Amino acid sequence: MKGLKYIIAGILFGIVMSKSEAISWYRIQEMFRFQSFHMYGIIGTAVVLGTLAVFIIKKYNLRDYQGNPIVFHPKEMSIPRYLIGGTIFGLGWALTGACPGPMFVNIGHAYWAILVAVAGALGGTYLYGVLRDKLPH
């Protein structure tokens, strides 16, 4: 029963993704073709809420549920790294019509064709792990 909170969070995530239509291949294609504001609204809302949450965490020095301080470490901006990674991610997203979280929600909806995309995502992640030391960071 230790993992029950994660199961509940996953179910809630799936409900939100389904109800907002963020798992829809058609909605994602509309976004990449600049035909609809729907997905941009969802992403924009997530960015605003995430920014607000970070602001509140920093302002009030909030702690996690175990009492540990929440610390944000600065990251070094490496434009080529983010440009290449973002391009690969965006191409995969545009070609499959799914990003990582909603892929698993689609499995929950029994859209079995998404298993091809999941296999590709897992294979790519594994390949990155194998090649990580040889890649420019």
Image (tube, grey):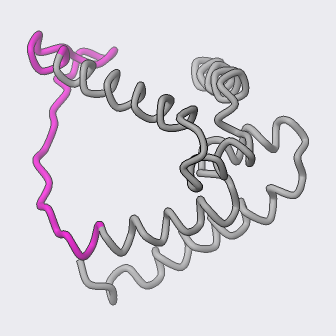
In depth, the one of 132 and 31 nearer the eye is 31
The structure residue drawn at horizontal position 17% and vertical position 69%, both measured from the top left corner, is 78
In the rendered view of the protein, which quadrant contains the N terminus? Answer: top right
- Locate residue 2, reporting x and y percent: 59, 21
The quadrant in which residue 14 appears is: top right
- Locate residue 98, reporting x and y percent: 66, 52
- Residue at the front extreme of this rendering: 35
**Is residue 66 left or right of 125 when viewed as pictured?**
left
The structure residue drawn at horizontal position 28% and vertical position 19%, both measured from the top left corner, is 64
* Region rendered in magenta: 56-82
- Asked whether 40 falls inside the magenta stretch, the response is no
- Locate residue 132, reporting x and y percent: 37, 79
Q: Is residue 3 visible?
A: no
* Position above or below: 47 against 63: below
Main secondary structure of the magenta stretch: loop
In depth, the one of 82 and 127 nearer the eye is 82
The structure residue drawn at horizontal position 10% and vertical position 48%, both measured from the top left corner, is 74
The quadrant in which residue 123 appears is: bottom right
* Position above or below: 11 against 129: above
- Locate residue 114, reporting x and y percent: 80, 55
The structure residue drawn at horizontal position 19% and vertical position 18%, both measured from the top left corner, is 57
**Is residue 107 left or right of 18 when viewed as pictured?**
right
